[in-house]
Image (spheres, rainbow, N blue to C red):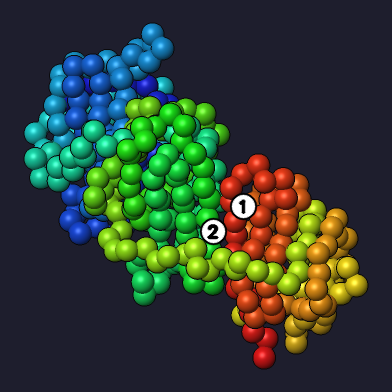
Amino acid sequence: MKFTILKNYFLDALNTISKVIIPTPAFDILKGIKFDLLADKLILTASDSLVSMEYTINSYIDDKEVIDIEKTGQVVIPSKNFIEIIKKAPTDEIFIELINQQIKIKSGNSEFNILVYDADEFPELPLVAKENNFKISSTVFNSIIKETLFSAAINDQRPILEGVNLVLENKNLTATSTDSHRMSKRKLILKDIELDKKFNMIVPRKALQYIQRLTENLDNILEIYYEENRILFVLDNILYYVSLISGKYPNTDKLIPQDYECSIDVKSKELYDGVDRVSLVSRDEKNDIVKIQIENGKIKLSSNSKEMGTAEENVDVMNIDQVDDFEIAVSAKFLKEAITAVASENVIINFSGELTAFTIQPSDKHRDIIQVLLPVRTY
């Protein structure tokens, strides 16, 4: 293996694929990045056993020579020190050559010789059937992740809650997440997909966080291939393989209240800012609690802390449909995240009782999204 590559293209690829590598993998070879140098491209591969990525750098990009390939070959290079060497390379062109069991790296007056692994020891990537697939805008999928992922559980005793449940049926894609204290659900219609396409899967939190970073500020087509226990995301020159969480996701529709005692229409920013301000006094407390009181057609937010004191703020209501005055306590963090996810100028909040779940939805109904939060007992 022998080639010269432009530093900026190389470093972009290494920084992207290295995010897959974990500090203590099951096998030492997974601390490295596999290099497959072909006649016209370089394919980089990294894996942590559950998640794998392939990143392709073509020898020519937009008619510009990025890689000068002299000799093809394969090798696995330990990632940590290698990436640091490339970052600090003094020139725009980097020469790399495999000699016996070492990689020679030359840039300007600098030269390194790094011990490597045999490429044959690197695990084969899983095969994913190509017939089960659909395409979606990367911008749309990024929004779906932002609107739901934050409600997924972290380090829960029930692994099925540590991801987002994606269900496709009759052209309707539904994304759901819950940690038992809140729930996020987003629905949309995929117009350009065959009617018989269907799946029900749980995609791990970590994988979706990475897809979110990859698709941030992009407006490309994201291809998704799926089978019973695996999903493959294809975005331009990146292939991202993910092992799905096994198990049956709970029926979350029963968490959504059907009746309500009070419904308010309020400006999202005013409510968010009010909650953010009053929660300042309790932010260091174990539970970041804000009380919402609704009386005489108005909202009063309040919070208190033994160490700091109290805070109150009134928020104007655009419209209210109320039976009786009542108050409810809620996590300020959860409430702010729900308001942000709804991403609407105004939100409608439906309260069903002081100890019953309440819902948050956009008032303009332009997106089928609902956030459900459980109140917090304060006694």
Tell me which label, 2 or 1, sits earlier in the chain.
2
How dense is the environment of label 1, judged by Cα within 10 Å: few (below 14), some, or many (20 and up)? many
Q: Which of the labelled discs sits on residue 341, or is there none?
A: 1
User: Under tag 1, what secondary structure?
Assistant: helix
Check disc 1 and give the amino acid type. Ala
Quadrant containing the C terminus in the rendered view: bottom right
Q: Is residue 246 above or below residue 174?
A: below
Q: Nearer the viewer, residue 63 or 182?
A: 182
Q: Is residue 78 above or below residue 279?
A: above
On the question of residue 12 being in view, the answer is no
Q: CA distance from mark 2 to mark 1?
A: 9 Å
Q: Residue furthest right?
A: 296
Q: Residue at x 36, y 71 (%)?
A: 158
Residue 175 % position (x, y): 46, 51
Residue 179 % position (x, y): 48, 68
Check disc 2 and give the amino acid type. Ser
Q: Is residue 284 above or below residue 161?
A: below
User: Under tag 2, what secondary structure?
Assistant: strand
Q: Residue furthest bottom?
A: 379
Left or right of 175: which side holds 261? right
Q: Nearer the viewer, residue 343 or 2?
A: 343
On the question of residue 251 being in view, the answer is yes
Q: Which of the labelled discs sits on residue 184, or is there none?
A: 2
Residue 230 % position (x, y): 26, 48
Q: Nearer the viewer, residue 143 or 371?
A: 371
Left or right of 110: which side holds 8? right
Mark 2 and mark 1 residues within 8 Å of each other at the beta carbon: yes
Q: Nearer the viewer, residue 208 or 1?
A: 208
Left or right of 180: which side holds 295? right
